[in-house]
Image (tube, rainbow, N blue to C red):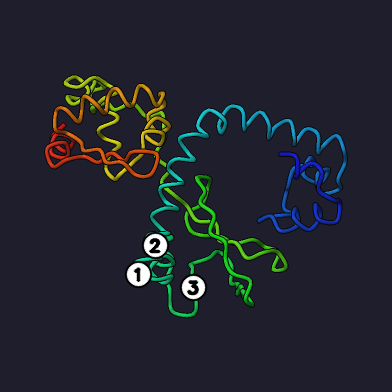
């Protein structure tokens, strides 16, 4: 949010010129942005801050937790199966044909790493397939989409009533049990369930005593996983 309004005029013109449909009825304010006019950049900065405050900031913790799961999963795949396995899991339009990564892309483009390495960046925003930076002089980056299920979606049945699992366990405890489809820490569960770690600890203790999850220590934290009984309860509820 600080970088965009402070971008130099030359780069602003180049970036705006890359937009699809540029020059065919684009709004006047975009011309003002491309020209680097302070009033237009100030309005853009205000709009970005308001959007961030309304759409991004309330869900930063949950988004970071989900992205962290993806990154951990990719790292584990790389260690177990090699880089090729990772490249092939970045989306259905991605194919790894060593030493080339192919992606179905709106425009034809070749990106050469030239020994610089490739940074993988997870995103929740407006991406159906991995994308890369337009400027070939910048550090090579591949931005790939991750799960975008809304964090705020209530667990309801088709008739709008609370589901059976929530009625049995309570909404928060049912949510925690559903979330443990892979090993998760208490902190990650708290972020995903939008509650506090102490609350999650209380619910996981009850779920553990009921035989629905197991908990093991990992370093200074603990990892929770559903048992077969817990999994069958989730699938049935």
Residue indicated by mark 3: 101
Name which residue lies at 38% across and 59% down: 76
Residue indicated by mark 2: 89
How far apart marks 3 and 1 lie (CA) works out to 16 Å
Name which residue lies at 62% across and 65% down: 140
How far apart marks 1 and 2 lie (CA) works out to 12 Å
C-beta proximity under 8 Å, tags 3 and 2: no
Earlier-in-chain disc, 1 versus 2 = 1
- Judged by depth in the image, the label closer to the viewer, 1 or 2, is 1
Position of 99 with respect to 20 (left or right) is left
Q: Label 2: state its secondary structure.
A: loop
Q: Report the label total.
A: 3
User: Where residue 93 appears, x then y in whole percent?
Assistant: 43, 64
Position of 25 with respect to 203 (left or right) is right
Earlier-in-chain disc, 3 versus 2 = 2
Residue 91's disc number:
none
User: Where residue 97 appears, x then y in whole percent?
Assistant: 43, 78
User: Where residue 27 appears, x then y in whole percent?
Assistant: 75, 42
Please name whichever residue, 27 or 202, is drawn nearer the observer in this view of the structure.
202
């Amino acid at each position: 949010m600080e970088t965009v309004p402070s971008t130099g005029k030359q780069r602003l013109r180049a970036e705006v010129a890359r937009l699809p449909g540029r020059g065919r009825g684009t709004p006047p304010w975009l011309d003002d942005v491309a020209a680097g006019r302070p009033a237009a950049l100030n309005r853009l900065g205000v709009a970005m801050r308001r959007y961030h405050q309304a759409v991004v900031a309330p869900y930063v913790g949950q988004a970071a937790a989900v992205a962290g799961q993806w990154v951990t999963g990719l790292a584990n795949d790389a260690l177990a199966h090699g880089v090729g396995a990772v490249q092939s899991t970045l989306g259905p339009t991605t194919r790894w044909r060593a030493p080339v990564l192919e992606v179905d892309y709106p425009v034809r483009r070749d990106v050469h790493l030239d020994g610089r390495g490739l940074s993988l960046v997870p995103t929740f925003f407006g991406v159906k397939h991995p994308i890369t930076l337009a400027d070939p002089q910048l550090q090579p980056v591949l931005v790939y989409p991750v799960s975008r299920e809304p964090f705020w979606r209530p667990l309801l049945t088709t008739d709008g009533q609370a589901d059976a699992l929530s009625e049995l366990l309570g909404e928060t405890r049912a949510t925690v049990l559903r979330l443990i489809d892979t090993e998760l820490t208490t902190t990650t569960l708290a972020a995903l369930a939008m509650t506090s770690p102490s609350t999650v600890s209380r619910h996981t203790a009850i779920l553990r005593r009921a035989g629905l999850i197991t908990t093991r220590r990992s370093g200074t934290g603990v990892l929770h996983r559903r048992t077969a009984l817990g999994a069958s309860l989730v699938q049935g509820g």
